[in-house]
Image (spheres, helix red, strand yellow):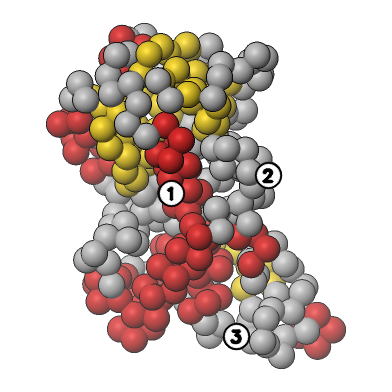
């Protein structure tokens, strides 16, 4: 499932390829995504020029010259391809094709949990799913003190708290495990038990891990790919995710001695951690 680093990578890839192009045409092959595509989608964005690219949590926002913005969430399995020419063969899950003066954008989503819509830019701040988003880890105000204030009254364990998009936006299941490992914090710790200094360490590692993932083009597990079709590489740097029983870097944990990296399930999601390193 695309998380903040993958969405940031997609944003950068599209921006580099399409830039401030004009939208010439829109082909909608499937209106029936989980949130259906608006009948008016094509009319709202055709002939507009792309003016700005941004990201909020896991949402990609493309501002247009006609006072509308394209807003997109990749859901569970969505990805956006950039192509110089119209694809000769439309793939099965190519739901939307956007022709611009600099090439084509193709929104493909096998599981259809993704979301794409055109909204008046001035009304973006009123969209319920955006207003309830918590602070972005790359917001200039994000720091350990802010994190401490957000966590100090929460009894929920820190791992599900990191996934709660109303506290911090953009972290998903892969990076939550990697971040807690990097910070040396046990995923079952109640959020309210974290000290200020642990929250500072956590905030620092949230940014560090996410930035390293962005620098490596995200993590390719399942079907994620960058807009130009290349894969992400950060999965090669995962320390604990999906590594049950293995030993983690620079640690004494070993499968035969203490079980190595453990897997537990919290709120229905897998968590991976090292019981030796994470306290
Ligand atoms: Zn270990």
Point out the image quarter for the N terminus. Answer: top right
The crowd level at tag 3 (other Cα within 10 Å; few <14, some 14-19, many 20+) is: some
Residue underneath mark 3: 277
Image marks 3 and 1: residues in contact by CB distance under 8 Å: no
Determine the image quadrant of residue 244: bottom right
The crowd level at tag 1 (other Cα within 10 Å; few <14, some 14-19, many 20+) is: many
Residue underneath mark 1: 8
Among numbered discs 1 and 2, the one appearing first in the sequence: 1
Q: Is residue 10 left or right of residue 144?
A: right
Q: Secondary structure at mark 3?
A: loop
Query: Mark 3 vs ligand 1: CB under 8 Å?
Result: yes
Q: Position of residue 76 (x, y in %)?
A: 55, 39
The crowd level at tag 2 (other Cα within 10 Å; few <14, some 14-19, many 20+) is: few
**Disc 3 from disc 2: Cα separation:** 28 Å
**Along the line of sight, the residue nearer the viewer: 41 or 272:** 41
Among numbered discs 3 and 2, the one appearing first in the sequence: 2
Image marks 3 and 2: residues in contact by CB distance under 8 Å: no
Q: Position of residue 220 (x, y in %)?
A: 64, 50
Q: Secondary structure at mark 2?
A: loop
Image marks 1 and 2: residues in contact by CB distance under 8 Å: no
**Disc 3 from disc 1: Cα separation:** 30 Å
**Disc 1 from disc 2: Cα separation:** 18 Å
Question: Residue at the location (40% across, 20% down)?
Answer: 101
Q: Secondary structure at mark 1?
A: helix
Q: Is residue 178 left or right of residue 130?
A: right
Residue underneath mark 2: 222
Q: Nearer the viewer, mark 3 or mark 1?
A: 1
Determine the image quadrant of residue 195: bottom left
């Amino acid at each position: 499932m695309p998380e903040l680093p993958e969405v940031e990578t997609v944003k950068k890839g599209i921006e580099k390829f399409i830039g401030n192009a004009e939208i010439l045409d829109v082909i909608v092959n499937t209106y029936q995504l989980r949130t259906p595509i608006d009948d008016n989608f094509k009319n709202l964005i055709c002939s507009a020029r792309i003016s700005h690219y941004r990201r909020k949590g896991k949402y990609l926002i493309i501002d247009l010259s006609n006072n509308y913005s394209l807003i997109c969430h990749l859901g569970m399995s969505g990805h956006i391809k950039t192509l110089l020419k119209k694809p000769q063969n439309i793939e099965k899950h190519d739901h939307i094709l956007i022709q611009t003066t600099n090439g084509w954008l193709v929104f493909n989503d096998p599981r259809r949990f993704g979301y794409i819509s055109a909204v008046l830019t001035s009304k973006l701040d009123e969209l319920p799913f955006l207003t309830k988003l918590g602070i972005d880890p790359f917001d200039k105000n994000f720091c350990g003190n802010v994190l401490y204030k957000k966590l100090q009254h929460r009894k929920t364990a820190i791992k599900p708290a990191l996934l709660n998009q109303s506290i911090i936006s953009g972290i998903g299941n892969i990076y939550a495990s990697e971040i807690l490992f990097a910070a040396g914090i046990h995923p079952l710790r109640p959020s309210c038990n974290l000290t200020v200094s642990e929250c500072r360490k956590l905030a620092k590692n949230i940014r560090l891990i996410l930035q390293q993932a962005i620098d490596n083009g995200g993590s390719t597990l399942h079907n994620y790919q960058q807009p130009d079709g290349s894969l992400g590489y950060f999965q090669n740097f995962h320390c604990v995710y999906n590594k049950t029983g293995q030993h983690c870097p620079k640690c004494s944990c070993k499968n035969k001695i203490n079980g190595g990296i453990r897997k537990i399930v919290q709120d229905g999601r897998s968590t991976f951690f090292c019981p030796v390193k994470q306290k």
